[in-house]
Image: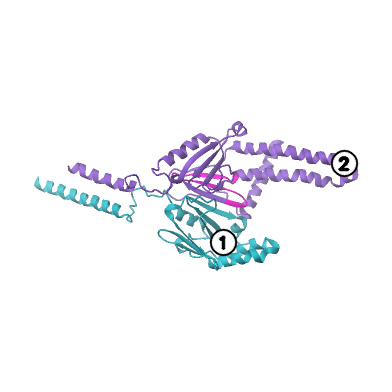
Amino acid sequence: MMHRQADTPRDPRSIDRPDPVLIRYYLITSLLTGPVFPFVFLPLYIRYKTLRYRFDDEGVWMAWGLFFRRQINLSYRRIQDIHVTQSLIQRWLGIATVSIQTAAGSAAPEMSIEGILDPESLRDFLYARMRGARSEDGHTEPTSDPILQLLIEIRDGIAVLNERVRALEEAGR
Amino acid sequence: MSRTAGKAAAWVYRGLWGVLVELLKVPDQPPNTPPGSGDVRSLKPSPGFLRYLKFWFWLWLVVFDLAIIGAWVALLIWIPWLGLALAPLAWGVAIIPDIIAYVAIHVRWDTTWYVITDRAVRIRRGVWIIRESTITFENIQNVEVRQGPLQRYFKIADVHIQTAGGGTSPDATANTQAHHGLLQGIADAHELRELIMSRAALSKTAGLGDEATPAGLSSAHRRVLEEIRDLLVPAA
């Protein structure tokens, strides 16, 4: 019974594969099914071996499968709910499943990111980028928006102009 | 006497919690929120919810235990030796699940957390499987308050939160289902509903992925435009 604790919060962008502990979790859960163990374990093993994640600036990409391959793309801005699920065995192994839901009409989560060592940092990473995550606090002005960038330049330009006008008025007085 | 018993029960319960935290890795803290979440409210189901669960517990206890013990007494009269032989089994079946259920009610109450920040609702519950879901106000479509007669007696209500997408029936009682958040056993459900609705109303969008305001500009644009106006006004 081991419990892995992620001491330093990992940058979720560096996650590209499930943690190797996931295969142990798959092994335990498939052993619990008893006699049908090989039939349960083999697909899970293939899934573990082929599972890939990518967290880029716009969204999440996830792919798995050997014979039948599946890829899911999902942009952060469309995320509606974030679920973090940890069963007892997962807690013992120190991993979690982070599920993401969009407004698509399915009951099952659109994306289940399995084998995550530090679910809290991934959750907060997604939380900071999901819908409704606008920075309203005026200190951090995102410059990715060209129109906003233009407006900020105009504002700063006017501020400089104001300074010059004031200086001229001072000089003329 | 009952106070001593209560103290002993509390002591045993704390010991049990130690086991839960150490062995089952059940967190005993409310779920954390990202820094800068503004006004954070950490809620638990009301004590009325505990009483409500216990009411159901006692109801089922009386029904089941009367049936089991009644059957056992009948057997004892009918075939005394068999009744005596089955005594430990009958009483065990009658009593042990009750203790487990009673403790489970307390553990369930203690492991249920609702955290409300200025951006989102976070719900966490569970012992074997811990489920935590985060729903932002931006995405909330509607809030529903439900109260049955018994819940009205205990002055509690369930608050259901729905986001777009559907996929599950709103009758489902699981706490963290798709597009659905359930805050069970809330004492002042109407106040909570008003809080959620007022925070959801702060968002100008319909919660369906439409990020911009009708003019195509976000609040950040508007803020910079206002700053430009303020810069121009003294110069004019």
Mark 1: secondary structure:
loop
C-alpha distance separating marks 1 and 2: 54 Å
* Quarter of the image where one finds residue A22: bottom right
> x and y percent of residue A139 in the render?
33, 50
Tell me the number on the disc at residue A4.
1
In-front residue for pair B110/A78: A78
Q: Is residue A98 above or below residue B72?
A: below
Query: Would residue A47 be found to the left or right of residue B205 on screen?
Result: right
* Residue depicted at x 58% and y 42%: B171
Does the magenta segment cover residue B112? Answer: yes
Q: Which residue is mark 2?
A: B76
Which quarter of the rendered picture does the N terminus of chain A lie within? bottom right
Q: Is residue A137 above or below residue B187?
A: below
Residue type at tag 2: Leu
Colour cyan, chain:
A
In-front residue for pair B12/A65: A65
Mark 2: secondary structure:
helix
Q: Which residues are magenta?
A: B110-130
